[in-house]
Image (cartoon, grey):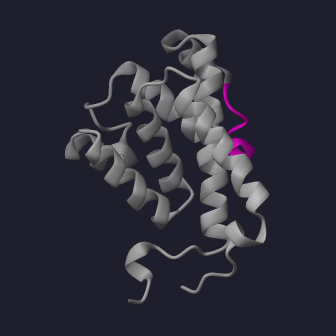
Amino acid sequence: MECRLDYRKVAPEALQAVVGLETYLHTKTTLEPRFIHLLKLRASQINGCAYCVDMHVKEARKDGLSEQWIALVCVWREALVFDPQERALLAWTEAVTLVSESGIPEAVYQEMLAQFGEKEVVDLTVAIATINVWNRLAVGFRVPHPSDTKA
């Protein structure tokens, strides 16, 4: 796969805006790292972003999340390793990522509110939106997966 263009060079201000969202998430919120890993990995799987899936699997491992937990994200509905908060977040991540298909069902929203406070719901939604931006940049401009680059 050949990269279409280097969006970082073409529009550095746009890149900085997305980095600003990441900075907010990592410095102005109290979100647990496992939640960030979970939503980034699931959204990246849905969006078919090999670059991001690879990155987020490695980051989750580095932060001590189990291989089983990481491997079962893609089949979370059938897996018993996810607690009620994680399950609510996975459903929310899918609904927000697939908003044009899902319309974000009320039951999914209500479960998020039952598991998280309002501020956390907003912050988690910003995190989902942010990884969706990264995914669309990487997939849209065909950012090569590290294993695809020629040495």
141, above or below 108, in the image: below
Nearer to me, 43 or 142: 142
Q: Which quadrant would residue 97 be assigned to in this image?
A: top right
Image quadrant in which the N terminus is located? bottom right
Residue 81 highlighted magenta (yes or no): no
Image coordinates of residue 129 in percent, x first then y, are 66, 41
Image coordinates of residue 28 in percent, x first then y, are 59, 24
User: In this image, 89 relative to 123: left or right?
Assistant: left
User: In this image, 11 relative to 119: left or right?
Assistant: right
Residue drawn at x 43%, y 31% as measured from the top left: 35
Numbered marks: total: 0
Image coordinates of residue 74 in percent, x first then y, are 39, 49
Residue bounds of the magenta highlight: 98-105
Residue drawn at x 68%, y 67% as measured from the top left: 8
Residue drawn at x 37%, y 39% as measured from the top left: 76
- Residue 84 appears in view: yes
- Residue 98 appears in view: no
139, above or below 93, in the image: below
Residue drawn at x 63%, y 50% as measured from the top left: 132
User: In this image, 63 relative to 49: left or right?
Assistant: left
Image quadrant in which the C terminus is located? bottom left
Image coordinates of residue 83 in percent, x first then y, are 33, 23
Residue 100 highlighted magenta (yes or no): yes
117, above or below 90, in the image: above
127, above or below 101, in the image: above
User: In this image, 13 relative to 40: left or right?
Assistant: right
Q: Which quadrant would residue 3 be assigned to in this image?
A: bottom right
Nearer to me, 108 or 142: 142
